[in-house]
Image (tube, grey):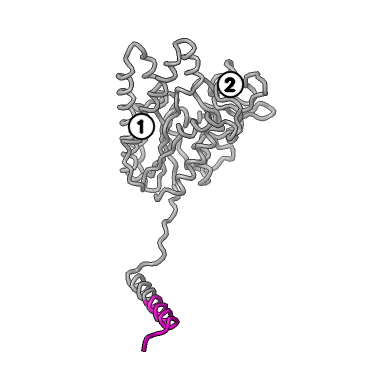
Amino acid sequence: MIPTPKARRATRTTRLAAAAALAAGLLAACGGGTSTVDAFVPGRILVFGDELNVLTTDGRKYTTNSVDENDVLQCKANPIWVQVLAAQYGMVFAECNPDAVANPKAKMLAAAGATTDELATQIRTFSSGDSIETDDMATVLVGMNDVLQAYASYPAESEDVLIARVEAAGERAAAQVNELAAAGARVLVATSPDMGQTPFAKAESLEKGDVAAAVLSRLSAAFNRSLRLSLTNDGSKIGLLLMDDLMHGMVRVPAAYGMVNTDTAVCAAEAPLPDCNNNTLITADPTPTVSSYLWADATHPTAVVHNYLGVQAITRARNNPF
């Protein structure tokens, strides 16, 4: 007897159900089941790098700070990016601890003016008195000062020579990140800002021609490219943050980020960083705010940039299979 279409469909359904049951049984026998990746929760956050990561001992930052109506610093307001990240895990830094949290778990190891060479010193100094633990999250942001130092030798030294210099610096930074990961830390590393888009670059271009900003941009790109290519990219211990791309987007479409100015420093000259705050801004029309300008001074971004980078860091920390 030839089976009817209805009978054939019933037989096929029975076979599929049996196959599914067999697969489920084999999976269970092998200890399998629904696969999940446990979220990594750091026990500490270790911050390395230059002043884009720094809280001074009294809680000031190298960006647009916040003071209250009595001109008292509010170090938790206008947080830098590592504060945004630390807050996600309920952590604070000793340098900004108005609630007197006992034994702050976020550690400030970065220093103003640091280059990739100082990054290595920071890590060695930490390791000499402590050790990396498997529940440590380290953050690294460096490179801006390497680029500015290299540019200071232009045009006495050729652009090719300077490109090679910052590429070597990018490789050194990546080597430090790789060592932190190899020691057991989970690492979030950020690319550095494009120095060719800074108010400093604009001023240099007025004096030396448009080539100045272009050289600064090419030096920044060379550093970041070398950094990225030299990272151990196994997808499990190192998460990459793209600060340069973030700020490029802010320059292209400032309104999308609530900005009105991407060319001018918002901090008045008489209040250099880290002393700039919401009461020491330039006079302009429309009235500037700490969130409406891209740049705090000639080379450092405002707190709004830090906020977006901090959110990017949280997203990467959540989604990277640490």
Looking at the rendered image, the disc whose residue lies closer to the viewer, 2 or 1, is 1
Per the image, the residue denoted by label 1 is: 225
Labels in figure, total: 2
**Quadrant of the image containing the N terminus:** bottom left
Residue located at (56% from left, 33% from top): 304
Q: Is residue 210 above or below residue 239?
A: above
Residue 270's x, y, as percent? 58, 15
Q: Quadrant of residue 254?
A: top right
Asked whether residue 240 is drawn in magenta, I would say: no
Residue type, label 2: Cys
What's the magenta bit mostly, secondary-structure-wise? helix
Residue 48's x, y, as percent? 41, 34
Per the image, the residue denoted by label 2 is: 267
Question: Which segment did they paint magenta?
Answer: 1-18
Residue located at (39% from left, 78% from top): 12
Residue 174's x, y, as percent? 33, 35
Q: Quadrant of residue 262?
A: top right
> Rounded to the nearest whole Å, what is the CA distance between mark 2 and mark 1?
31 Å
Residue located at (46% from left, 34% from top): 245
Residue type, label 1: Arg
Question: Can residue 93 be seen at all in this image of the molecule?
Answer: no
Q: Earlier in the sequence, mark 2 or mark 1?
A: 1
Question: Can residue 25 be seen at all in this image of the molecule?
Answer: yes
| Residue sticking out furthest to the front | 2
Asked whether residue 13 is drawn in magenta, I would say: yes
Image disc number at residue 27: none
Residue 312's x, y, as percent? 49, 41
